[in-house]
Image: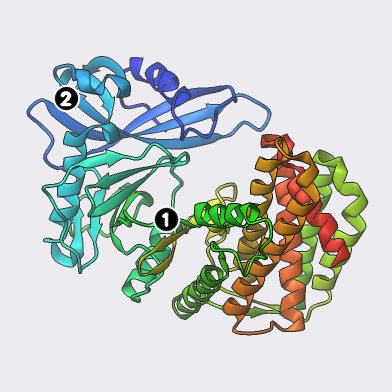
Amino acid sequence: MTAQTPELQPDVFVRYLERTRWFGGKGRPFTVTGVRRIGELPGSGDGLWVVIDLVEVTYGDGPGGTEIYQVPLALYTDPETRLDHAFLGWWEEPEFGWVHAYDALHDREAMGLWLRAFAGAADEAGGNRTDLSSGLAFHRLEGHDLDLDTHSTLFSGEQSNSSVAFGEDALMKVFRKITPGVNPDIQVHDVLTRAGSDHIAALYGWLDWVDGAPSSDTDDGRGTTMQLAMLQQFLRTASDGWDLAVSSARNLFAEADLHAHEAGGDFAGEAARLGEALREVHVVLAEHFPTERRGADAAVELADAMTTRLDDALAVVPELAPHAEELRATYDRVRALPGLDVQRVHGDLHLGQTLRTSLGWKIVDFEGEPAKPLADRLLPDSPWRDVAGMLRSFDYAPRVVERSFAQDDAEGAPQRAYRADEWAHRNSNYFLTAYAGGQISAEDRVLLDAYVADKVVYETVYETRNRPAWVDIPLAAVARMEQA
């Protein structure tokens, strides 16, 4: 990437990236090797210019490699003290002169330009508004009129991306780490919105940029597309699925003499409704994306991949060694299958990717597993991967609650372990039965068991590297799988 901004700016971006929540290179040595200005938002001028820079980061450690991050900037002629917390620096721009630069997502004036640009796209042919000089293109779907009188609020909780709410009307997710190609979150939301799915936040529009865009309406040249942001329905009153599950488990722990089905916070009905919602989403995805029945070779390939991940995990988590033989046997049963059905799936599903609204469950964040390359996240997979992710989440919720009681009441550990097992078993069964519409076939059970085991192995590595005190949760799950 060629730097197209003053020499001062790369150092400014280094300091800025180091203090953000969403930068994925924390703790790694890096340099900013390029800053590219890709466009200016419509309506900029008169002392405020809103621009989008792509920042190329090159790592100097063993893995090395480069990444590209999106940094929208609000450039002001005069300092804005209200934005001191989002200040990047002060420098001279070739077009605008001396400016004070701020992260645009913190600035309501700058965000107003984004909102109006999306609204303006609705008036263009096909809902597309493209700046031919830069390649920035705002796209809109029909069916919703944006509220242009509202103001923006930046969410502080997200890490890998940034989200901005526009009043109670819309939510914009700005993708920070940018990869060339179609973003699966936009792609899937587009399909499910047009299909009328009730189990997502409806997509209103998105912003992308074409590197090497056509220079005129008659130019047929095609460049490389990078998708920068998506605008969707804001589910303001929704409750996080993980929080609801943890609250239910905590209620059960507080009811010492009651079983899970007797406790006031029983979650089984919600688990069943969530299973039905996932099934309906999978059905729509199968109708609009390619599906395939793959043969025995695909089953062998899947089993081999799971075995390789286990081998890699054993080097990181030696405590897995006593369970390795049983895990390999689980994968070997996949190796013996005649084949498997694949389709488009969520790819990184757990309770934290769900929202409960007054109208039912919504599934969010269809980007797939962040650690995987974009091309892999766009590939079809078995829907049982999503189911396995949810089952592991149902097992985690009561274990987290169980841990919160451990220091204050060591003598109650056996009872808490029993209650955690009861909660996890009950809600997993309700979810799975609702998803499958009854009992699942022997072939599907083999696949599901393997995906659950694969997920548990991943969890042991993740916890060892990030929360070592929690690694006993997935290790205990491996032990229970052997006893089942």
Name the residue that disc number 2 marks. 95
Residue 92 is situated, as x and y percent measured from the top left of the image, at 22, 16
Q: Residue at x 17, y 31 (%)?
A: 49
Q: CA distance from mark 1 to mark 2?
A: 46 Å
Task: Give the structural element (helix, strand or loop) at label 1.
Answer: strand
Q: Residue at x 66, y 69 (%)?
A: 426
Residue 197 lies in what quarter of the image? bottom left
Closest to the observer, 458 or 483? 483
Residue at left offset 54%, top offset 61%: 265
**On-image quarter of the N terminus:** top left
Q: Under tag 2, what secondary structure?
A: loop
Q: Quick check: 177 above or below 331? A: above
- Disc 1 versus disc 2: nearer the observer: 1
Residue at 57% over, 60% down: 347
The residue that mark 1 highlights is 239
**Residue nearer the viewer, 423 or 383:** 423
Image quadrant holding the C terminus, namely bottom right
Q: Please identify the quarter of the rendering in which residue 220 is found.
A: bottom left
Residue 48, how many percent across, how many down?
Answer: 14, 28
